[in-house]
Image (spheres, grey):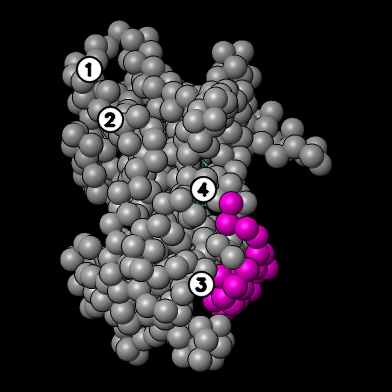
Amino acid sequence: MDVVQKIRDRSAAVAVVGLGYVGLPTAAVLAARGFRVVGADINQAVVASVNRGESPIKEPGLEELVRKAVAEGRLRAVTSAREATQEGDVVIVVVQTPIDEEKRPDLSALRSALEEVAAALRRGHLIIIESTIPPGATRNVIAPILESSGLKAGEDFLLAYSPERAIPTRTLEEIQSNARIVGGLNEESARAAAALYRCLTSGEVYQESVEVVEVVKLIENTFRDVNIALANELALLCEAMGVDVLRAINLANKHPRVNLHMPGAGVGGHCLPKDPYFLINEARKRGLKLSLIEAARERNDSMPLHVLRKIEQALKSRGKSLSSAKVAVLGIAYKGNTDDTRMSPAEPVVRALMERGVEVISHDPHAKQDFGGRFSSNLKEVVAGADVLVILTDHDEYKRLSLEELRPLLKRDAVVIDGRRILAREEVERLGMDYLGVGC
Ligand code: SAJ
């Protein structure tokens, strides 16, 4: 029976290589849709957690889905991608593809996962890559590794690229409803992968050549990064002019063809800070400079330092030295309502404050990480005696912060720096504190 038929009648077993923020939700949803799923991850703790029916990451709804899938015997995890490949008819590879110190794609995790897959590859397998990859990688990097098995891509086994498109904190919902793009090494590969995604999402499934799809994924995240950079740049100007950028953005967005993003303390996570470099790097190889995209990256990377300068100025204006000041950092995760701290803007802020001799204590309701400073999940302890309270992450818990309760714990002349513009300025000022926000 061919793989498309097996997908349609759910008799296909699916191997998911990489049980991270996308792999595990994908594995759990496929299991809920009736597939037998074997997940593989080199992290023993992740595998053990999944096999206990527990999610190692925080993502709304995931824990419950994993528990059910494991209890019903439709999901289990192993440490060997080779073993998972042996069991699967379809293999989805979704491992991290970061950038190296020179900001070039680092495909080492992807390569080693693929070598494991290649070792168990057989005729009729459908291999789908979901990791974000540089242009041309499916044909020039991935296919050759898999073909080291002696089998030919597109003939003996099928090979497709379908980049994940789900936003953390809404991953489950988006996996099951977003439109999906599928690039095949050939028509048959695209058709087979599209059949799988039709079982996963209620959104449209579009088929294209793999070369186009590789670029599409990078365009999506670059679009967002460049737009955030525009908002950040406007925020800096408005701040200097004494105009509130949010009031301006909200009204500009009433125009039918304008949709500005939110300025803030920086852009973190494992996608936006690095995916544009996949394009920048490719362009450089071809003698092109993507100056707009490069400038956007620099602007977004500069935002944590802008917040740092605001902290320094606030202390200076009160005649306080950095080495005798206490700063309470609220928010360590890279964005609201996640426990993910990868490339979080909080890291450069905390580290720079520490270097300047500031007493830093950070808090986060979801993540636990100190970035070299002190961390506590007790908010009152964090803000007690602080000269500056700085918000770096837009967690819902911080939007509901009871400033009234915290106020007596802070220093009398404390300043609030709102890096995500989630507090009401009037409320902060009513409580007798100065309010400084990004873009106002
Ligand atoms: N941010 C802003 N202003 C905004 C929006 C976000 O400063 O207006 C900041 C956030 O605080 C965060 C960073 O940008 O630090 C990135 O957050 P995000 O929510 O924009 O994106 P990610 O990295 O969580 O997920 C993105 C998504 N891409 C797009 O929306 C185009 C998601 O759909 C992708 O699947 C994901 O990257 C990925 O894995 O590629």
Residue lying furthest front:
150
Choose the circle earlier in sequence order: 1 or 3.
3
* Mark 3, residue position: 155
Q: Which-is-in-front pick, marks 4 and 2?
A: 4
Identified at 63% across, 68% down, the residue is: 187
Q: Secondary structure at mark 3?
A: loop
Count neighbours of disc 1 (C-alpha within 10 A) and say few if under 14, some if 14 to 19, many if 20 or more: few
Choose the circle earlier in sequence order: 1 or 2.
2
Q: Secondary structure at mark 1?
A: loop
The amino acid on which the numbered mark 3 sits, given as a three-letter code, is: Glu
The amino acid on which the numbered mark 2 sits, given as a three-letter code, is: Val
Query: In the rendered image, is residue 394 in sight?
Result: no
Query: In the rendered image, is residue 41 in sight?
Result: yes
Whether residue 157 sits left or right of residue 216 in the image: it is left
Residue lying furthest right:
256
Identified at 24% across, 11% down, the residue is: 321
What secondary structure is the magenta-colored segment mainly? helix
Choose the circle earlier in sequence order: 3 or 4.
4
* Mark 2, residue position: 350
Residue 179's spot in the image, x, y percent? 64, 63
Choose the circle earlier in sequence order: 1 or 4.
4
Question: In this rendering, is residue 162 above or below 9?
Answer: above
Count neighbours of disc 3 (C-alpha within 10 A) and say few if under 14, some if 14 to 19, many if 20 or more: some
Q: Which-is-in-front pick, marks 1 and 3?
A: 3
Q: Quadrant of residue 111?
A: bottom left
Q: Which mark is residue 251?
A: none
Mark 1 and 3 residues: CB-CB less than 8 Å, in contact? no
Residue 133's spot in the image, x, y percent? 46, 49
Highlighted range, magenta:
187-211
Q: Depth check: 88 or 240 in front?
A: 88
